Amino acid sequence: MSTRIEPGTDLRLDPRSYWLEQALAADPGAPCPPLQGKARADVCIIGGGFAGLWTAYELGEREPSLDIALIEADVCGAGGSGANGGFLSSSWHSIVSLCRLFGEDEGVRYARALAAQIDEVGRWCARHDADIELHAEGAAFARAGDWEPEPDREPIELLARHGLGDRLRVLTAAEVRAFADSPQFRGGTFIEDVATVQPAKLARELRRVLLERGVRIYEGTPLTGLCTGIPVHVHTPSGRIECDQAVVATGAWAASAPPFRRAFAVAVDSVVITEPVPEILAEIGWVSSIGFGDDREAFYYLRRTHDGRVAIGGGSLGIAYGGRIDGRAGEATSRAITSSAGAAVASEGLLWLFPQLRGVRFTHAWTGPMDMTPAMVPFFMSAPDQTVHAGLGFSGHGLTATKVGGKTLASLVLRADDEWSSLPVVGPPLSAVPPEPLRWPLVKLLASTIETSELAQQRGGRATLRGRLAAAAFERYSGTIKGPAA
Ligand SMILES: Cc1cc2nc3c(=O)[nH]c(=O)nc-3n(C[C@H](O)[C@H](O)[C@H](O)COP(=O)(O)OP(=O)(O)OC[C@H]3O[C@@H](n4cnc5c(N)ncnc54)[C@H](O)[C@@H]3O)c2cc1C
């Protein structure tokens, strides 16, 4: 696809993200045919996104003799892990809400664990000779437009109390514009401990490393039934795995499983990517690989790629009714997944932020599902008999949270009482989403009212009263959710 971007352009969605297409074209690992017949494993991991892949990796690190199998319905990286914006990000900017949820000490402990993963991924790449286009240069959250809020100083003050005052700093307009000269940038915040990566390459390199370590990966192998007990039976269309323990890491797809029906809503985010435009980027001084976000509720996130393209996502979210995203991403049945409306909003956002890009072409547009908990933090839980574990609800922040999640799930499997199994995110979800048929209209109404109001301001109009009320209602509601330690 190659579409000239003009506001309102009808973008055709690609079945796979640009990242995954690129990663699969030069795949570093051996083929992984579907499971046929019966197999046995100590641990069976269900889902080949970052959560499943990091769990398999951590288990192998800690117990090299463990016999691990992993089943994936499509190909590893086909879910959100191969479709995201590629922001491997600390949560310093969300520190106030983490502390509200978990109490200050536990909130800071969790945020420190997340931030530490950026360097860890760098070391992992060096150790395994993995090229994932990692650039650990930080991110600028810009105030784009006079109507966006002034940078919030509360997180900076909170971090300073814990000796972390240098992890966030306020930027002037000139400082943000020095990173990339958008006429909309009015100032912002710089966040340390953020890297950009080519996410599908990370997924496929993880798969390669696991294969080299003897993990048996079955792609094209969806879970069709899970029978708990000893052993656990993992059923698939052409075979079955008997195992001592299983780990459910199917991301947004878990929404249809009874234990998780009220655990999260499935939001759908869209990303678009331009043709290579290195000369224009050089003209506007966009030469670094830092990530950008803007500070509105329905925020845009954008970054450049190795070959001088710009990828932008956000600005709007679709909602899948009842979390139904059956089938693989490109074949999904939910209208939220197959709608290009979000891609059009993202493309409009890019032209608004950088009018210098007017006239460039988009080569790819895609959507991906996200498992969004009301508190925007994941949860990790085990069945009462400790044979089945789940790590879900990564809520659009899964690049670092799944890396911590892999350590946490490995600790739950190994029954280790340690820094990972004691994190405040271990336990059931902090709050339930409303049941259908209430959830879809409620979330849709809230999200689209906020987005419409913000888009109106972006287009030079005013915030709507309904938009302001919806944003306030959302803030108020999320402020009421508390974790056990808070
Ligand atoms: C457009 C978009 C942009 C995003 N941007 C960012 C970002 O910049 N930074 C960030 O931190 N996070 C971002 N996220 C979120 C991040 O991608 C996710 O939080 C993370 O990838 C979740 O990983 P996961 O392994 O839990 O899920 P997934 O990657 O979705 O993996 C789940 C896997 O399970 C498989 N599966 C499903 N059903 C079955 C079954 N029955 N049997 C076997 N396998 C099954 C799926 O095919 C899939 O491969 C974004 C997400 C999207 C969609």
Image (cartoon, rainbow, N blue to C red):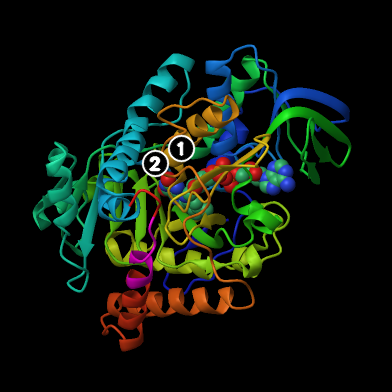
- Residue position marked by numbered label 1 in the rendering: 198
Amino acid type, mark 1: Gln
Residue 486, image x, y percentages: 33, 52
- Residue 365 can be seen in this image: no
Query: From which residue to which does the magenta span run?
Result: 476-482
Instruction: Tell me the residue at 70%/57% (across/down).
Output: 258
Classify the position of the N terminus by image quarter: bottom right
Instruction: Tell me the residue at 19%/68% (across/down).
Output: 149
Instruction: Tell me the residue at 21%/65% (across/down).
Output: 184
The one of 433 and 37 positioned closer to us in this rendering: 433
Amino acid type, mark 2: Thr
Q: Is residue 480 magenta?
A: yes
Q: Is residue 98 magenta?
A: no
Q: Nearer the viewer, mark 2 or mark 1?
A: 1
Instruction: Tell me the residue at 80%/33% (across/down).
Output: 34
Q: Residue furthest top?
A: 65
Residue 334, image x, y percentages: 67, 66
**Quick check: 38 left or right of 259?**
right
Disc on the earlier residue, 2 or 1: 1
Where on the picture, by quarter, is residue 134? top left
